[in-house]
Amino acid sequence: MRQRTFSEEGFEKHRKKTRREQFLEDMDQIVPWQELAAAIAPHYPQPKGAGRRPIGVERMLRIHFLQHWFNLSDPAVEEALYDSRAMRRFVGIDLGREPVPDETTICKFRHLLEARDLGARLFELMQQYLQENGFRIGRGTIVDATLIAAPSSTKNQEQQRDPEMHQTKKGNQWYFGMKAHIGTDSQSKLIHSVVATPANVHDSQVLGDLLHGDETRVWGDSAYTGQRDVIRRHAPRARDFTQRKAHHHRPLSDDDRKRNRTKSRVRAKGEHPLLVLKQIFGFRKVRYRGIHKNANRLFVACGLVNLYMVRRRMLALA
């Protein structure tokens, strides 16, 4: 048994386990670290000669996930690791023996995930892992979209806004940024499909990409009205349960309103993963320039949203 250093736990008599510690302990148990690290390993730098060995893939992945859970930038997560014992314990860092990976190392790991499109791969692996543990994707899909804000200021080096982001009007308010489109299972509330686009792309334009094909029912708000042909093409057995929309010369009947209210009770389930994504994980604004980098972040975040929502059931199965 190795001797503990004074930087480790055990030398403080009066301690209380915090909610952060408990959360990280829970996620440590349910995240499929081996499978995720194995997907990254073929693209990760290998040790050469007698030089310094690269930091382990799993350790860097743990740091990357901390950035998602606590909405931390590259330099901010380095600072947080020095500051938080719970985070260091989760990553496996003992300051008595080694320093925290610096922000440049953390940034290079993120760039590796972006360059190899590994965000989408990690999302797929987390989805497969949940299905193997009994969380099946059913026959009903709720489609929805949410706006992710981007800086609209031109006070930067290029003196222009991000050219890949666009503006759109929602109600009487203009928004600038990107849009996250998701397909959510109507029973488990798990995200099974994700698409990232500029904000000005209409929700209905990516409807086909949000369906897995085996649906028998598709729910969506009034933005998806009139897309029966698209639904039939991508999910031949699915019935259209999108909201009815009133027109200028054809208001909704009482029966239409009643059906819309019934549909809304199901559609509300699609808001739950978006609440976790934006309110708990803090993904309300883009962090990088360009759609591709933010899409990579979105894929990983959606995979972690799924794990977060089923964490208690997963722990009960363990």
Image (cartoon, rainbow, N blue to C red):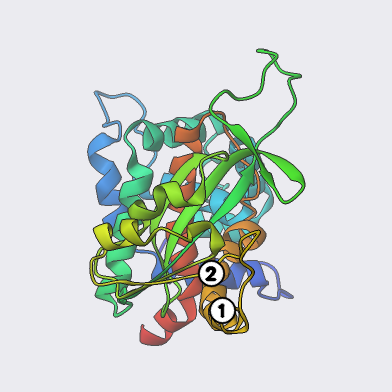
Q: Farthest residue toward the bottom?
A: 316
Return the x and y of residue 159 as percentages of the image width and height: 70, 14
Whether tag 1 and tag 2 are in contact, CB under 8 A, the answer is: yes
Q: Position of residue 305 (x, y in %)?
A: 49, 63
Can residue 143 be seen here?
yes
- Tell me the amino acid under the disc marked 2: Arg
Q: Which residue is mark 2?
A: 244
Which residue in the structure is indicated by mark 1?
256
Q: Is residue 11 left or right of residue 36?
A: right
Q: Of helix, strand and loop, which one carries label 1?
A: helix
How many marks the image carries: the answer is 2
- Residue 8: tell me if it is visible: no
Residue 209: x and y in percent read 34, 52
- Residue that appears at 33% across and 56% down: 230
Among the two numbered marks 1 and 2 on one chain, the one whose residue lies closer to the N terminus: 2
- Give me the residue at 68% from left, 72% from top: 18
Q: Secondary structure at mark 2?
A: loop
Q: Residue at x 61, y 73 (%)?
A: 252
